[in-house]
Image (cartoon, grey):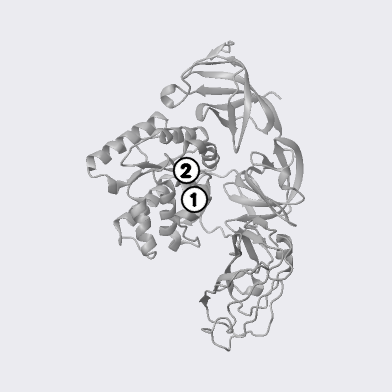
Amino acid sequence: MDRTTHLRSSFVLPLIKTVSPLSSAPQPPISSRLSLPTTSSSSLSLSRIHHSTPPLSQTPMAISAATTTASSKLICPCSPSTNPSLPLSNPIFCTNLTRVILSSSFINNASSICLHKHLSTTTLHNHRRAFTVRAARGKFERKKPHVNIGTIGHVDHGKTTLTAALTMALASLGGSAPKKYDEIDAAPEERARGITINTATVEYETENRHYAHVDCPGHADYVKNMITGAAQMDGAILVVSGADGPMPQTKEHILLAKQVGVPNMVVFLNKQDQVDDEELLQLVELEVRELLSSYEFPGDDIPIISGSALLALEALMSNPSIKRGDNQWVDKIYELMDAVDSYIPIPQRQTELPFLLAIEDVFSITGRGTVATGRVERGTIKVGDTVDIVGLKDTRSTTVTGVEMFQKILDEAMAGDNVGLLLRGIQKVDIQRGMVLAKPGTITPHTKFEAIVYVLKKEEGGRHSPFFAGYRPQFYMRTTDVTGKVTSIMNDKDEESKMVMPGDRVKMVVELIMPVACEQGMRFAIREGGKTVGAGVIQSIIE
């Protein structure tokens, strides 16, 4: 009875198979709560049911994180017998889920004769784990230009708090749901330590644009995940504590943003409420501008907005309907997004090139296939297209059977979209982060290449000592990191060199221990011992 299956997916699946047509009369919206005891027979209790507009008979359901037990029964709280507050004329019956063996069985066999035809969100729980079944919000419609943005900066400077404040403030402008802090820092160890470990993506809209927002970890231990997040950005919001000024990860994030190709940046000076002297804040702003200029960003031109993400978030939590002009701290959030709208240009998407997506995460849906998520780097993809899975293992082909973005169905995903692709006939063990999905025959895996590399000085956070041929650091390419060996080094004059000093710009031949999908012109970062020691661009592929 204790057997569980955990399903991680936002993919649209037909959950409700039968709907009794006993009543066609419109039902009033309701929201009710019922707490049922969990019995030894592993019955599921229904803790919250909310009815809204989409007809149940027409609404496919989406499962985001499901746990099912070997035998489950579900009682519908809409029934007057279990909820006396409802009028007796409401012809509501029980929803009965029987003989649930695995998640696929749950999906395929669940049936409902709950006659409220406006089911939107149902949260079910048992003694092991909670899960949510929610209605898919229809198709993703491209009404506004789509831009990928993200928060970067030192640990504990307020990146996740700012992300939460942004979603809360902008929820009224689009179809996006406001996200609380603990919904962005989702993993238990993140909440326990108060730091972000994995990148988290949320969506929101301004009046002019639709944004996918990546909240990157600032902690030094998780820079690998920050690189993955930064590689997806069209622009970044650099968060700097006004009370502390730029810190070590601030500098490393600026450097990595430059190396992975983040083209533009806006700065948010957070924790303004903790700075009593306005001159101190001006000094921090000056320091940030100089730092950005030292990494070849236009420090004098970049917009810098000061505010307090925490005070803005607290105001929005207490009154989500706050408008511009009602609260000085919330106004700073709007001012920040005005700067992002105006300063960060809409990127030119490479939609005409062959499709390529670097896989960031992988999970499986039993009975349906495996889902790969990531940002479409170039080209377009739709259901029915064939793709190659390239890198780390032998190349193999598969067919895309589903495309989604933010729990909405996409007819066609294009360059810049953060999507999940459902792949036919692929097991979770066959595919992993770091591989790429590409149009068949357009990219191949390689282990040896020649590159031009800049080696960081110790003042830039790099090595303190030189290295020699035979050096074996980690090479970060797109979403993968793989060990490689520097087999030969040449200086600017193409003369073989024995040694590379911090601050040198050299040409080197690199041999990777595993094949990676790479091509001429691709950027990469070199890391060793928890710090970035160099950055380079592939000049030519050798093998």
Mark positioned earlier in the residue sequence (2 or 1): 1
Image quadrant holding the C terminus, namely top right
- Specify the farthest residue to the front: 40
- For label 1, the SS is loop
Q: Nearer the viewer, residue 16 or 538?
A: 16
Q: Nearer the viewer, residue 35 or 143?
A: 35
Q: Position of residue 423 (x, y in %)?
A: 72, 50
Q: Is residue 207 visible?
A: no
In the displayed structure image, the side of residue 35 where residue 115 appears, left or right? right
Rendering quarter of residue 153: top left
Q: Position of residue 278 (x, y in %)?
A: 23, 43
- For label 2, the SS is strand
Q: Nearer the viewer, residue 510 or 347?
A: 510
Q: Position of residue 428 (x, y in %)?
A: 71, 47
Give, as a three-letter code, the residue at label 1: Asp
Q: Residue at x 71, y 34 (%)?
A: 444
Give, as a three-letter code, the residue at label 2: Gly
Task: Look at the picture and state if 520 lies above or below 497.
Answer: below
Q: Position of residue 80 (x, y in %)?
A: 57, 84
Image quadrant holding the N terminus, namely bottom right
Disc 2 versus disc 1: nearer the observer:
1
- At label 2, counting other C-alpha atoms closer than 10 Å, the crowd grade (few under 14, some 14-19, many 20 or more) is many
Q: Is residue 20 visible?
A: yes
Q: Which mark is residue 185?
A: 1
Rendering quarter of residue 396: top right
Label 2, on which residue? Answer: 235
- Specify the farthest residue to the bottom: 89
In the displayed structure image, the side of residue 86 where residue 15 appears, left or right? right
Q: Pointer 2 and pointer 1: residues touching (CB < 8 Å)?
A: no
- At label 1, counting other C-alpha atoms closer than 10 Å, the crowd grade (few under 14, some 14-19, many 20 or more) is many
Cα gap from disc 2 to disc 1, whole angstroms? 21 Å
